[in-house]
């Protein structure tokens, strides 16, 4: 291992000219999973977006390290956002049932709205950069995704090859 590889991990970051158009499009698509429930149902259902991101990552995680990195990063951000939005939705239901619309509820709603706008902007920026073949690091989740796919603990994408053999004794 050379000195830069030892510092950052066993897998070098791909350069834009090394990526296929399909890899770029798939990496971009991973960020667009955040809009899955909006386009499918017209509703912001938090866990539907997460499930779409999880399926996308599951399908693409062994095809390309670049795509897997972006899909994993967005999956983590989507999980966190879904958790926040689910908590807020529960808060809305409690407020509807009890009729208690407190100032804390409205302040919490403002924070959730700001966070969701930041998440969407970050996702669109990530999609554009990924389509250009650039590695984009979201706040917090970018470091975790880097460590998983390019850092010192990164492992091979493909599982060990399976060899079919006849049953013992034949």
Image (cartoon, helix red, strand yellow):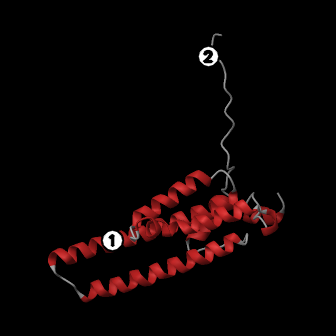
Q: Is residue 98 left or right of residue 112?
A: left
Label 1 close to label 2 by CB (< 8 Å): no
Mark 2, residue position: 167
Mark 1, residue position: 87
Q: What secondary structure is found at the residue carrying circle 2? A: loop
Q: Is residue 124 above or below residue 161?
A: below
- Which residue is found at the position 48% from the left and 82% from the top? 117
Could you say where residue 43 lies in the image, as x and y percent from the top left? Answer: 38, 70
For label 2, the crowd category at 10 Å Cα-Cα, with few meaning under 14, some 14 to 19 and many 20 or more, is few
Could you say where residue 74 lies in the image, as x and y percent from the top left? Answer: 55, 66
Q: Is residue 160 above or below residue 32?
A: above
Could you say where residue 71 lies in the image, as x and y percent from the top left? Answer: 59, 62
Q: Nearer the viewer, residue 50 or 142?
A: 50
Q: Is residue 170 left or right of residue 91?
A: right
Q: Is residue 170 above or below residue 64?
A: above
**Which image quarter: residue 24?**
bottom right
């Amino acid at each position: 291992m050379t000195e830069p590889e030892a510092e950052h991990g066993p897998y070098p970051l791909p350069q834009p000219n090394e990526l296929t158009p399909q890899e770029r499009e798939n990496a971009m698509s991973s960020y667009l999973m955040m809009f899955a429930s909006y386009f499918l149902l017209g509703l912001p259902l938090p866990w539907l977006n997460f499930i779409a991101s999880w399926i996308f990552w599951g399908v693409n995680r062994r095809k390309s390290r670049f795509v897997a990195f972006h899909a994993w990063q967005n999956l983590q951000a989507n999980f966190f956002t879904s958790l926040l939005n689910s908590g807020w939705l529960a808060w809305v239901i409690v407020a509807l049932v009890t009729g208690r619309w407190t100032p804390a509820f409205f302040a919490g709603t403002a924070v959730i709205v700001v966070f969701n706008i930041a998440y969407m902007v970050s996702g669109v920026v990530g999609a554009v950069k990924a389509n250009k073949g650039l590695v984009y690091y979201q706040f917090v989740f970018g470091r975790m995704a880097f460590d998983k796919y390019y850092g010192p603990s990164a492992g091979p994408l493909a599982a060990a090859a399976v060899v079919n053999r006849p049953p013992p004794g034949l």
